[in-house]
Amino acid sequence: MQKYLQNTFAKQLNKASFAQFGHSGHANKKPPVRVAITGAAGQIGYSLIFRIASGEMLGPNQPVILHLIDLPFAMAALNGVVMEIQDCAFPLVKGIVATDNQAVGFKNVDYALLVGAKPRGPGMERGDLLKDNGKIFTETGKHINEHASRDIKVVVVGNPCNTNCLILANQIKDIPKENFTAMTRLDHNRAQHQLADKLGVHTTDIRKIAIFGNHSPTMVPYIDQMTAKNHKATVDQQWVSQTFIPTVQQRGAEIIKARKLSSAASAGNAAMNHITTWVNGTSESDFTSMAIPSDGSYGVPKGLIFSFPVSVKNGKYSIVQGLPISPFYQGLLDKTIKELVDERNAVDHLLK
Ligand SMILES: NC(=O)C1=CN([C@@H]2O[C@H](COP(=O)(O)OP(=O)(O)OC[C@H]3O[C@@H](n4cnc5c(N)ncnc54)[C@H](O)[C@@H]3O)[C@@H](O)[C@H]2O)C=CC1
Ligand SMILES: O=C([O-])CC(=O)C(=O)O
C-alpha cells in the first residue's frame, strides 16, 4: 500500500491518492470519521496532523480517515507527510486521502480544519490578506457544499479567519450555517496564560473568560466574569487596559517578529481544542470562545462571523447571554464590530 501511495504521488500529482489500512489488536469499534485538513503541507498542518492521527482531537476510541488537501505544487511535500504518518503506525488511522482535488478531498468529510491560506509576513495586517484568501474560501465553500457530509463541522483557521468563514458560509446551501465557525481559541488560550501568570495559578484554573469579535488586533479579551480556582477573580484595570489586552491582541505579531514565521504549534493546538470542545462540550463552570454566525446578541449585526463566549452541549454551541458589558468593554466591542463590518463591505462582491 505504501508503494501504491508513493507511485501515485510520483506519477499523478494532480490526482488523489488513497490508502486504507487497518491495524490489529486495538479495541476501537466505532466507524472511522473523515477529517479534512487544508494547507496540509504547511507548517500548521505539520503540527496538527500527527496529533489528530494519535487521537488527541477526537479521543482514543475514534478511528479517523485523514483527508489531506493542498495545492498542486505542494504535493511532493505532502507525500513526505503521508510517508511520515505511515511510519508512525498510528492505530487510529484507517486511511489517508492526500489530494489537490477539493472534490475528492471533501468527499463525505465530517470535520474540516481549513488552514490552507497565505500566511501573514512581518509588517502585514490581516486585512492585507483579504483579497488573496477570499478567493480560496469561495472555492472551498462550493466543494464543501457539494461533497461533504451534511453534518460537517468546520473551523476556519486561515486568516482573516472570520471573514474567510463568512465568504465560505455564503456558498453553503443545505448545511446549517451554524456548522461554519472560525478560530479564536488561540486568542482565548493566550489570554488564559497571561491571566494565570498574573494571578500565580495554573492556566486550567482560569475560567469564564472569552474573546469577543474579530481574530485581529481589535479582538476583545473579556474578563469581567473571570474565576480563578472557582472563585471570582479580579486584576487591576490599568494592567488590563495597558498590558493584558494589548499583549493578547498583538501576540500573533509578536511571534512573527520572533520566529519570522507565524505561530504554528499553538495555532494547530487551538484548532484541535476548538473541535474537541465542540464535540465534547464545555463544563458547567466555564465557557469558551468560538467565532460563529451572529444572531444579533450583544448588539452584533446578524450574520457577521463574530467571536462570542459560548457554552457547548451535545455537539451544539450557544452564546452565553447576559454578561455585563461595561462602557470600557462596549467601546472595544464597537471597534471590533466596525472592523468586521468594514471587512464584510470589502468582500461584498464575494457575498452575492
Ligand atoms: N486563526 C488563527 O488564530 C491563526 C491563523 N493562522 C493562519 O493559518 C494559515 C496557514 O498558516 P501556516 O500553516 O503557517 O502557513 P503555510 O504557508 O506554512 O501553509 C499554508 C499551506 O496552505 C496551502 N494552501 C494555500 N492555498 C490553499 C488552498 N486553496 N487549498 C489548500 N491548500 C492551500 C499552501 O500550499 C501551504 O502548504 C495562514 O492564513 C495564517 O495566517 C495562523 C496562526 C493562527
Ligand atoms: O498573526 C498571524 O498572522 C497568525 C495569527 O493569526 C496568530 O498568531 O494569531
Image (cartoon, rainbow, N blue to C red):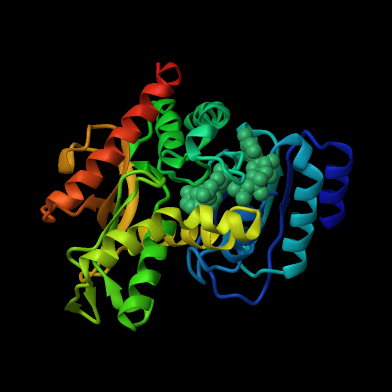
Q: Residue at x 17, y 52 (%)?
A: 328
**Residue 259 placement (x, y as % from top left):** 64, 59
Res 196 quadrant in image: bottom left
Residue 70 in the image: above or below residue 284: above
Residue 215 in the image: above or below residue 194: above
Q: Residue at x 18, y 54 (%)?
A: 320
Number of disc labels: 0
Quarter of the image where the N terminus is located: bottom right
Is residue 115 at all visible to an observer of this figure? no
Q: Residue at x 61, y 63 (%)?
A: 53
Q: Residue at x 67, y 69 (%)?
A: 90
Quarter of the image where the C terminus is located: top left
Residue 78 in the image: above or below residue 58: above
**Residue 258 placement (x, y as % from top left):** 61, 60
Of the pair 338 and 140, the residue shown nearer to us: 338
Of the pair 183 and 85, the residue shown nearer to us: 183
**Residue 69 placement (x, y as % from top left):** 65, 42
Res 9 quadrant in image: top right
- The image quadrant where one finds ligand 1 is top right
Is residue 203 at all visible to an observer of this figure? yes
Of the pair 120 and 158, the residue shown nearer to us: 120
**Residue 329 placement (x, y as % from top left):** 20, 51
Left or right position of 146 against 67: left
